[in-house]
Image: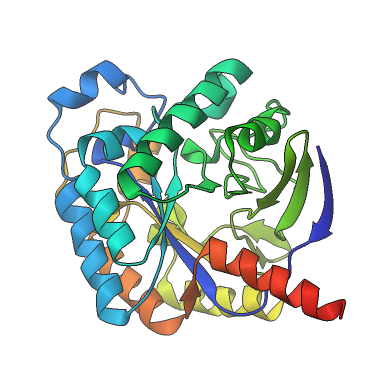
Amino acid sequence: MKRNAKLQAEGPSVFSVDVEDWFHAIPTEPGQNLADWDALPSRVVANFREMLVLFAKRKIRVTCFFLGWIAERHPELVREAAAQGHEIACHGYSHRLVYQMSPEGFLADLRKSKQIIEEIAGTAVLGYRAPAFSVTADTPWFFDALAEAGYKFDASVFPGRRRWGGMEGSDLRPSIVESSGGPIAEFPVTMARIAGRPTCLFGGGYLRLAPYPLIKRMGAQVLREGRPLLFYIHPREIDPGHPRLPMPLVSRFKSYVNLASTRAKLEKILDDFSFTTFGEMIADNKTQRAAATQ
């Protein structure tokens, strides 16, 4: 695996949604077995549709990383998102952590979820995000598998410490990864430098915990540095009344802190920043590179 060319990062930000249900919050806790999910009450339909309304009101296109298991059971959500012009991407099928799978098992999960989502959406699925950003230094086959399965971009690398993975010291900027099957555009989780330390403020529990003025100020700083600002959220995070999973105290805090404030924070983000999709950002970079060589 070799990183060579840098992707330029000027212009709009990207807002993305990891389309999964409330019981996918913690992938390693007891009770999160695939066989148990059908017996749990689903809330993803109402929550995701509420998000689509927020995007449509502002005429914003986002990138939707669908869990294959969700797409299979709620194909109408994939179709509605695609019909509204949102980019359709993949979050895997089973929500298993990448580093807990074998290379063969991971490739099978990639192919299965891609096929399911593509057949529903009626369009090619080119982007991937690993559950819990679980690509690590112990998964050197990760990008090779993505290319073999037909993906063109990834948004899985967390360039810092993380409970379920993380690649501390990784490049904070998007780059092109040369895999055995061809190039993959990598968009790492956005980190802002606070007191010199890379810190995530722009998605999940990090976004819910941080005060909005700090998110806005650090987001502007990232853009001034010439890096893209990549936000991510889950449908359950705008639903403070969703059921709670039994889990240790620290996990419970990270999963449920400030849920009541998330929708208002989301609306401020959508109002204060401009957005594109990952695919459009890649296309714009190709156009810029081509123009520079003429």
What residue sits 25% from the left and 16% below the top? Answer: 35
Of residue 167 and residue 71, the one placed in the foreground of this image is: 71
Q: Looking at the rendering, which quadrant does residue 283 occupy?
A: bottom right
Q: Looking at the rendering, which quadrant does residue 271 occupy?
A: bottom left
What residue sits 83% from the left and 58% below the top? Answer: 5
Q: Return the x and y of residue 149 as percentages of the image width and height.
A: 58, 33
Whether residue 236 can be seen here: no
Count of all numbered marks drawn on residues in the image? 0
What residue sits 36% from the left and 49% below the top? Answer: 122
Q: Quadrant of the C terminus?
A: bottom right
Of residue 246 and residue 286, the one placed in the foreground of this image is: 286
Q: Is residue 72 left or right of residue 169?
A: left
Of residue 246 and residue 283, the one placed in the foreground of this image is: 283
Of residue 228 and residue 124, the one placed in the foreground of this image is: 124
Q: Return the x and y of residue 68 as percentages of the image width and height.
A: 36, 35
Q: Is residue 165 left or right of residue 177?
A: left
Q: Is residue 178 above or below residue 16?
A: above
Q: Is residue 185 above or below residue 141?
A: below
Q: Quadrant of the N terminus?
A: top right
Colour treatment of the image: rainbow
Q: Looking at the rendering, which quadrant does residue 107 occupy?
A: top right
Q: Return the x and y of residue 128 as percentages of the image width and height.
A: 52, 44
What residue sits 35% from the left and 43% below the top? Answer: 255
Whether residue 40 can be seen here: yes
Q: Return the x and y of residue 237 as percentages of the image width and height.
A: 29, 54
